[in-house]
Amino acid sequence: MAVSGLDHARSRIAAAARAAGRSPEAVRLVVVTKGQSVEVVNTLYQQGQRDFAENRAQELAAKVGLLPADITWHFVGPLQTNKVRLVRPVASLLHSLDRLELAAAWVKGPGTPPPALVQVRLGGETTKQGVEPAEALTFARQASDLGIEIAGLMTIPPPLDDPEVARSHFRQLALLGTELMDVLPAASALSMGMSDDYELAIAAGATIVRVGRAIFGPVPN
């Protein structure tokens, strides 16, 4: 299932990029391996996949040492400050920077902290992590001033039955990303789009899509 799912996702990403007049190479597939075994991850590695993500700090820390060293690990879930010590040494990109308390914890420790994406909360969901769109640019500047390389923006839109509404959320993030690049020119990444909507996100300008269930099938919580 995993290998065929990976091939299918790659094909759909390439087709969506071409349909949007973009190069397939402009979209980075990050495979979310929540709940997957080391053996399954290694199988996808053997198929050439190098970008993987976890959304739980302990699971990320447990897997890293058991898999090839040239994997690029992403952290995509909510991160408590007391779990930064598990994620910071091994993650290449934090997708979920959403508050100054976390930014202050992220810069602590040896060396330069890994880059981060500012998570933006779209759709008005008060239960979801993220910075309000109106506050995102100010927050990005504040985090940058602390010493974090802000690589761009990330969002997780609310579950929607209407694809046009989802599309509008992705377009909103893309517009916000353009504004961010006026302030931080290198902050060009847009991490948006998951198993149900990554083609819509690519059409709106996603540079990173985070796909798990469409590759592996449902994973128990």
Image (spheres, rainbow, N blue to C red):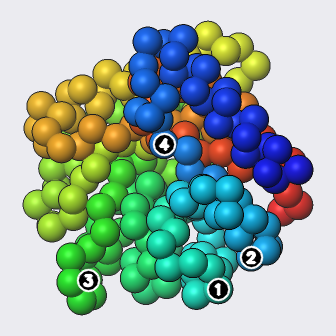
The nearer-to-camera label among 3 and 2 is: 2
Q: Using the rendered image of the protein, determine whether residue 135 is visible from the camera's viewpoint.
A: no
Q: Is residue 119 above or below residue 64?
A: above
- The answer to whether the residue labelled 2 contacts the one labelled 4, judged by CB atoms less than 8 Å apart, is no
**Tag nearer the camera, 3 or 4:** 4
Kind of residue at disc 2: Val
Residue that label 2 marks:
38
> In the rendered image, which residue does mark 3 sit on?
108
Real-space Cα separation, disc 4 to disc 1, in angstroms: 24 Å
Residue count near mark 4 (Cα–Cα under 10 Å), binned few <14, some 14–19, many ≥20:
some
Residue at image coords 36%, 25%: 174
x then y, percent, for residue 207:
42, 36
The span from disc 3 to disc 4 (Cα, nearest Å) is: 28 Å
Quarter that holds the C terminus: bottom right
Q: Is mark 1 on a helix, strand or loop?
A: loop
**On the rendered structure, is 165 left or right of 104?**
right
Disc 4 marks a residue whose amino acid type is Arg
CB atoms of marks 3 and 4 within 8 Å: no
The answer to whether any part of residue 54 appears in the image is yes
SS type, badge 4: strand
Q: Residue 136: horizontal and vertical position, in percent?
A: 29, 41
**Label 3: which secondary element:** loop
- In depth, the one of 3 and 72 nearer the eye is 3
Tell me where residue 176 sits by quadrant: top left
Q: Is residue 59 above or below residue 55?
A: below
Dot 4 corresponds to which residue?
28
Q: What is the number of the mark on residue 66?
A: 1
Q: Which residue is drawn at 61% across and 20% down?
A: 15
Tell me which numbered mark, 3 or 2, is placed earlier along the sequence.
2
